[in-house]
Image (cartoon, rainbow, N blue to C red):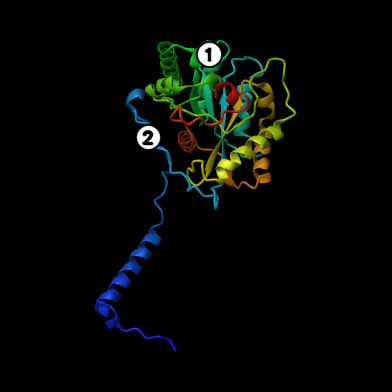
Amino acid sequence: MQPRFSSRAFNVPFRTLLLVVLAAAAHLAHAQDAGPAPLPAAPPALCPAPPALCPAPLAPARLPDTPAAPAPIRFLLSFDDGPSGSSGDNSTVRVLDTLARNGVQAGIKAVFFTQTRHWHGGGTETGRALIRREHADGHVVALHSATATHANHRFMATAELDDSLRRGVDDLRTLTGTTPRLVRPPFWAYDAATLDSYHRHGLRMLLTDLNANDGKIWGVNFSWHKRSNMLAMLTETRKRWAAGAMHVVDGATPVVVTFHDVNSYTARNLEVYLRILVDVARELDMPVAAKPFYDERDALEWAALASTVSSAAEHPRLPGFWNWLWQ
């Protein structure tokens, strides 16, 4: 026999209790219909003030610290050390052409960390024209250095570094009409002082998750380890992804990949690298977004800004032996 309940068993009238229950149910239904607050779908407008006065962009929310359902990944391509100043078979030109037209995903956009005054790169008329083309093609043009050589920012005096950053920001603003927001230190070398300098000039530092290890090596123009290298590094990245420890932007987890557009081998084999990235993600059971690579500048820049390092105390892992060297 089922027990029977009477409103007299409670200290409130039955009608009042019923109204409370109905109100709670309506509130729950409204909350379910509303859903969670969405992440910003696009970056805020570029700050019109001098870079040093611009506020740091807010990072999108992180996934909860749970491996239950990590968001699919999306590869965020970046290129260092360019542009090439070669007047012949120019590797940066080949990279740009391949990103625009390839058999994996047409119209891929990337972040180009440029050396605006390198004697054989951005300091040449060919190099300056390519920086203008990178912007015109819809890529994000960022700063790597504004010195005649690939100088280590950690070894520069504060005033010297500030002067070079000011020149680099001015160079890119002149060439592209926009103020750069991203920087990557040469040799991955940074400390609290260099980060402070970057922030004073409105720059946020982007490192990497995967590295093709294709830095320009004179006399070496091949690689037997393209796939195994990417597989090993993505395996390490997978641990953070599965733990929910990576940023999620617009429903996907950006995975930053670094190449060098001054490497002619990379330029000739870029489409092979694109296929490898998608293949190793599937091999590791990491779902990939419907579009594996970013193809729109604002979304690309927003994802990159969300992945930047804000404090020297964070100590993210650096690629290859650089982690051992600097940390």
Q: Name which residue type carries label 2.
A: Ala
Q: CA distance from mark 1 to mark 2?
A: 32 Å
Give how far across and how far down residue 157 sits, in percent: 44, 11
Q: Residues within 10 Å of mark 2 (few under 14, many from 20)?
A: few
Q: Residue furthest bottom?
A: 1
Badge number at residue 45 = 2
In the figure, is residue 134 to the left or right of 224?
Answer: left
Query: In terms of image quadrants, where is residue 30?
Result: bottom left
In the figure, is residue 222 to the left or right of 63?
Answer: right
Q: Is residue 171 above or below residue 40?
A: above
* Number of numbered labels in the structure image: 2
In the figure, is residue 201 to the left or right of 104?
Answer: left
Query: In terms of image quadrants, where is residue 212?
Result: top right
Q: Helix, strand, or loop for circle 1?
A: loop
Q: Quadrant of the N terminus?
A: bottom left
Badge number at residue 151 = 1
| Mark toward the viewer: 1 or 2 | 1
Badge number at residue 135 = none
- Identified at 55% across, 10% down, the residue is 119
Q: Helix, strand, or loop for circle 2?
A: loop
Between residues 76 and 316, which one lies in front from this camera angle?
Answer: 316
Callout 1–callout 2 Cβ contact below 8 Å: no
Q: Residue furthest right?
A: 224
Give how far across and how far down residue 107 sits, in percent: 57, 36
Q: Residues within 10 Å of mark 1 (few under 14, many from 20)?
A: some
Say if residue 155 shows up in the picture: yes
- Identified at 63% across, 31% down, the residue is 98
Give how far across and how far down residue 70 sits, in percent: 54, 48
